[in-house]
Amino acid sequence: IGLDDNKISFSQIQLISYYQKSESMTMFTRGGYDMIPYHSNLYEENMKKCTFYAEIYNTEKLFGPKGKYLITYYLENYETGRQLEDFTFRKREMAGPVKPILADIDISQLPVGTFNLVIEVRDSLNQFRGRMKKMIVRENRYYTFKEEDYQTVDITGTFIDRFNDKDSLREFIRCLKPI
């Protein structure tokens, strides 16, 4: 595969639509589970969880046998790179030749938007060692936006910077009302 032995390496993140404990080896078996891949990166409003699978390599070489490290997987805003705290999960692990990760993230309260699913590895001193990302898109008309959702939007450097007169803004909004 061409992995670098001097750093943490990752497989690609595979989105999963369904998995179960494996009875026998098939082409869909990984890490003792039969997994049916998810065909898209779009999660519609009726979908309540995002399931994914990935593998981490070289932890044993870098952290030593039974060395400890931290896996963090989370969702971040695609445009800003800001981590979503409500969708962040951490797991302590012991080093080994290959570390499979099969996890579910509850996305029922995830708002509409584009996000990165991120897997990150840090050593026992909390130093960053590696990261892998996969973009996902969420549709969710049932989600009600909260005030803090609007506060996380960064509009600097966008066309909105040109509009700072309150009267002009009122007029622009009034013109949109018929639409």
Image (spheres, rainbow, N blue to C red):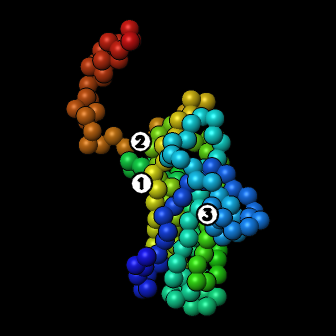
Badge number at residue 153? 2
Amino acid on which the number 3 mark rests in the picture: Met
User: Does label 2 or label 3 sit earlier along the sequence?
Assistant: 3
Q: Is residue 9 above or below residue 158?
A: below
Q: Which residue is mark 3?
A: 27
Residue 85 appears in the figure: no
**What separation in Å lies between label 2 and label 1 (alpha carbons)?**
11 Å
Amino acid on which the number 2 mark rests in the picture: Val
- Image check: 96 left or right of 170? right
User: Within 10 Å of the Cα at label 1, are there few (<14), some (14-19), or many (20+) other Cα atoms?
Assistant: few
Depth check: 2 or 110 in front? Answer: 2
Badge number at residue 81? 1
Labels 2 & 1 near each other (Cβ < 8 A): no
Q: Position of residue 104 (x, y in %)?
A: 65, 55
Depth check: 110 or 52 in front? Answer: 52
Depth check: 20 or 112 in front? Answer: 20
Residue located at (61% from left, 45% from top): 107
Q: Position of residue 22 (x, y in %)?
A: 74, 64
Callout 2: SS = loop
